[in-house]
Image (cartoon, rainbow, N blue to C red):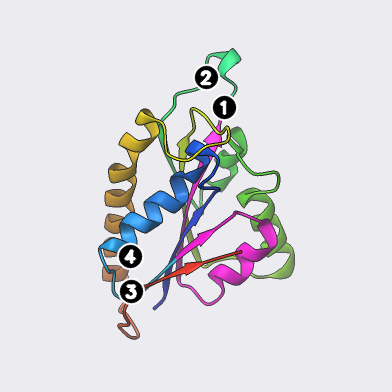
Amino acid sequence: MTVTVVGTGNEFRQDDGVGPVVTQAIQLRNPAGMNVVIQNGEASTLLDTWAGSELVIIVDAVVRNPSAGTAHPGKIHRITDRSVENFGKLTSSHGLGIMEALALAAALGRQPRHLVIYTVEAQDTGYGVGLSPTVAASVPLVVSAILADVRDFCHRIPPFASTPGHLIRGE
């Protein structure tokens, strides 16, 4: 069984780098049997990234309209393949994002079998490196939640093989 964790985002756009930061933290735990991928979030390349995976977990920053009073920087959302329509209420910090990738995958018959999306509401996606304190505080919570999801999933489906995890940097 293959599990792929994808951190999407741009590490040079402050909180937009939360996906890469989370995946780097997971990789430091040296997870066996997991592909850990950092990617810029471009919709068409996500399809290749998750090809052949039983479980795909994606981490991305999202923005809400702060003038509407709905923004909660650092707030974590967990969206499953059964509730992915809820992602439309959040806006990816990328021009084309996860929802577009899922629509393209559906049209091509290349959807992931099982999907979990973690989003973290961004405070600042301006130019610069490093996460805002509120978003940085969410990182260990997302890492723990992802590792729990993987443990739960792997106990439901017997693994085919155990291979060392590795970090892949997407383009």
Q: Which residue is mark 3?
A: 157
Residues shaded magenta: 37-63
SS category of the residue bearing label 1? loop
Inter-mark Cα distance, 1 to 2? 6 Å
Residue 12 horizontal/vertical position (percent): 54, 44
- The image quadrant of residue 126 is top right
In the rendered image, the vertical position of residue 36 relative to residue 14, given as above or below: below
Q: Is residue 108 left or right of residue 147?
A: right
Which is closer to the viewer, label 4 or label 2? 2
Answer whether residue 41 is visible to the viewer in this image: yes
* Residue farthest to the right, as pictured: 107
Residue 111 belongs to the span the image colors magenta:
no
In the rendered image, the vertical position of residue 86 relative to residue 110, given as above or below: above
- Residue type, mark 1 in image: Arg
Residue 21 horizontal/vertical position (percent): 40, 50
Lower position in the chain sequence, tag 4 or tag 1: 1
- Residue drawn at point x = 39 percent, y = 57 percent: 23
SS category of the residue bearing label 3? loop
- Residue type, mark 4 in image: Phe
Q: Is residue 157 left or right of residue 128?
A: left
